[in-house]
Image (spheres, helix red, strand yellow):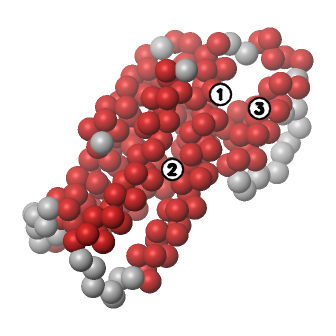
Amino acid sequence: MIILGVIGALLTNIVFAWQRAFQRNPATIYLLAGGIMTAIHLPTIYLQSILVDGFDIGIFNTNEIACREHNYLLYVTTIPTISFPCFAPFDRYASTRFYTISPLTFIVVFTWKTVENLRSTFITNQYSKSTKRIRHMLTPQLIVLAISGIPFGLQSVYFSLTSDIPKDDQRQAIEHLFVQTNRLSVLYLFLHVKRS
């Protein structure tokens, strides 16, 4: 899954960086940044977690420099990987309004208002096919991000509460399967949107 995620992130960067139709759209900057952070985040964070937690290979957790690098990259890449795709619909919403807006807090509201504004304005004929494609790609991704944000928060609380409890291999495997499925569901969503 990590390999497919990295390939997906690199292909996203290639498509948005090299296609002239997408270069004129300001929302693609956020998607490019999200793709770059995902390409860094997946192999550096998850490969180490799989080796240490899944196979009990202590290559990275016994080296102090690698441990510090892992913690640094964990905090530096996790939030942007999740946040950059959320900034794109906010940018689209702000650019389709004719007056100043106050910041909204929920991703779902940004996406819903963006679609509402694009449908209700008289200038929708000026939007190119690439803008519509980006909107169709972002909407399902943001729904998945909003839904997966809840388990991500609950997962942190769960790991904090159960950190002192000894866990057998089966319980750890189930926990890691849930975490990986939650985080990589966006890749499968993109594949589904691409086919439709």
Whether pointer 2 and pointer 1 mark residues with C-beta atoms closer than 8 Å, the reply is no
Q: Amino acid at mark 1?
A: Arg
What residue is shown at x 10% (from left), y 64% (from top)?
A: 57
Which quadrant holds residue 36?
Answer: top left
Which label was assigned to residue 82?
2
Q: Quadrant of the N terminus?
A: top left
Q: Nearer the viewer, residue 31 or 98?
A: 31
Give SS at disc 1: helix
Q: Residues within 10 Å of mark 1 (few under 14, many from 20)?
A: many
Q: Which residue carries the number 1 mark?
A: 135
Which label was assigned to residue 13?
none
What residue is shown at x 27% (from left), y 79% (from top)?
A: 167
Q: Nearer the viewer, residue 169 or 81?
A: 169
Identify the residue at the far front of this view.
170
For residue 130, above or below residue 1: above
Whether pointer 3 and pointer 1 mark residues with C-beta atoms closer than 8 Å, the reply is yes
For residue 99, above or below residue 73: above
Give SS at disc 2: helix
Can see residue 196? Answer: yes
Q: Which residue carries the number 3 mark?
A: 115
Task: Report x, y in % for residue 148.
Answer: 54, 54
What residue is shown at x 53% (from left), y 27% (from top)?
A: 193
Identify the residue at the far bottom of this view.
164
Which quadrant holds residue 9?
Answer: top left
